[in-house]
Image (cartoon, rainbow, N blue to C red):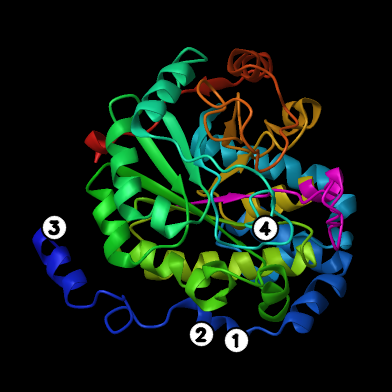
Amino acid sequence: MSAEENKKKFRSDPDGSAVFGHGFADKISEYDWDATIALVEQATEADVLRVLTKAERNRTLLTPEDFAVLISEAADTHLEKMALLSRHFTQERFGKTISLYIPMYVSNACTNKCVYCGFNHDNPFTRTTLTMDQIEQECEAIKTLGPFENILIVSGEYPSLCGVEYMEKVLRTVRPHFHNMTLEIQPLKAEEYYRLTQSGLNGVVCFQETYHREAYKQYHPRGMKSHYDWRLNGYDRMGDAGVHKIGLGVLLGLEDWRTDTVMMARHLRYLQKKYWRSRYSVNFPRMRPSESGYQPKTIISDRQLLRLMLAFRLFDHDIDISMSTRETPFYRDNILTLGVSSMSAGSRTDPGGYATEPDSLEQFEVSDERSPEDVARAIRNAGYEPVWKDWDSIFD
């Protein structure tokens, strides 16, 4: 479809409902939460061996039900085998490389009241939304940290301050400095995503947080984020708008991490079938206790997180698996050859944190505080190559 045809398509349906249907929010009702837990808890060693044999010999796509087997406790004694297969499939697809990116927070203003987030609207902090001049300074400061070309632009969800008009200006300000721009912002209409692709947008990351419909409302009591269907169908709107790369994720610990990630595997397969022109990525942020009093419902251990990452690589060889600076240097260094394909480095999670507003409110604390060059050195020491740029629209 041509650009002009796309424009007409979006103009004819500004809400994205009549043309694009309802999306995955309707389909997810086919999957029972408790039955999904049972898939994981009832998996046996024989099931694990069957799935590993399928992964190794047949080289066919695993199903979400196969994925459920691989994240089960029954698979724990086969972690070494999973790691060998994961490393093989990752090198086969990505080579011995790790793509590096850096986040840039442009606003911590937010209308949502997520009970676990530092940007919660009710938190009594002064909010910061960067001007284009400040964003220019942030870009220049980031460039002194390393030759980054992949940038993740992050904002709180505040439509009147950080809506599509603001983000369009941000992208046009950032584009001269970085070739690959990804957004992590509030879900938008399909026509708005398409509009941003015309300003250089390459990818969008959105965390569903949890696929548990009832619990979702408890964690998100107020604001646009409280609308479960709107958020879940946002990925369909990204696909309809032709976003090049779509990033999925859940917050591990809000609900049972095993069930949430099986739901995410189902969601991924749905998206890949329907929006096959887009690439996909997954991220596994672990929730931790916070000073505000929030306590994760479940804690996922280092070993369980590793098993989850390996299972996802066996489930899908092509997907980009990212590991952020939420994790410690020791952990990131020890898993980088086992299935990860991208990492953040030098991260600041406060708007203006690199140059203009170093004391603004952070979304979460960073665990890996090493410089980008130190992270790159650790990658090279592992026998891998840090990649600062791996995509540009001109390559299409």
Q: Mark 1: few, some, or many residues within 10 Å (few <14, many ≥20)?
A: few
Q: CA distance from mark 1 to mark 2?
A: 6 Å
Give amino acid for label 1. Answer: Ser
Q: CA distance from mark 2 to mark 4?
A: 32 Å
Between marks 4 and 3 in the image, the one whose residue lies nearer the viewer: 4
Query: Does 288 lie within the magenta span?
Result: yes
- Describe the element under mark 1 as helix, strand or loop: helix
Residue at the image position 68 percent from the left and 73 percent from the top: 216
- Describe the element under mark 2 as helix, strand or loop: helix
Image side of residue 248 versus residue 16, left or right: right
- Label located before the other in sequence (4 or 1): 1
Between marks 4 and 1 in the image, the one whose residue lies nearer the viewer: 4
Give amino acid for label 4. Answer: Asp
Residue 341 rendering spot, x and y as whole percentages: 57, 37
Which residue is under mark 1? 29
Q: CA distance from mark 1 to mark 3?
A: 34 Å
Which residue is under mark 4? 122
Which residue is under mark 2? 26
The quadrant the C terminus occupies is: top left
Q: For this rendering, which residue is in front, 124 or 41?
A: 124
Q: How many marks?
A: 4
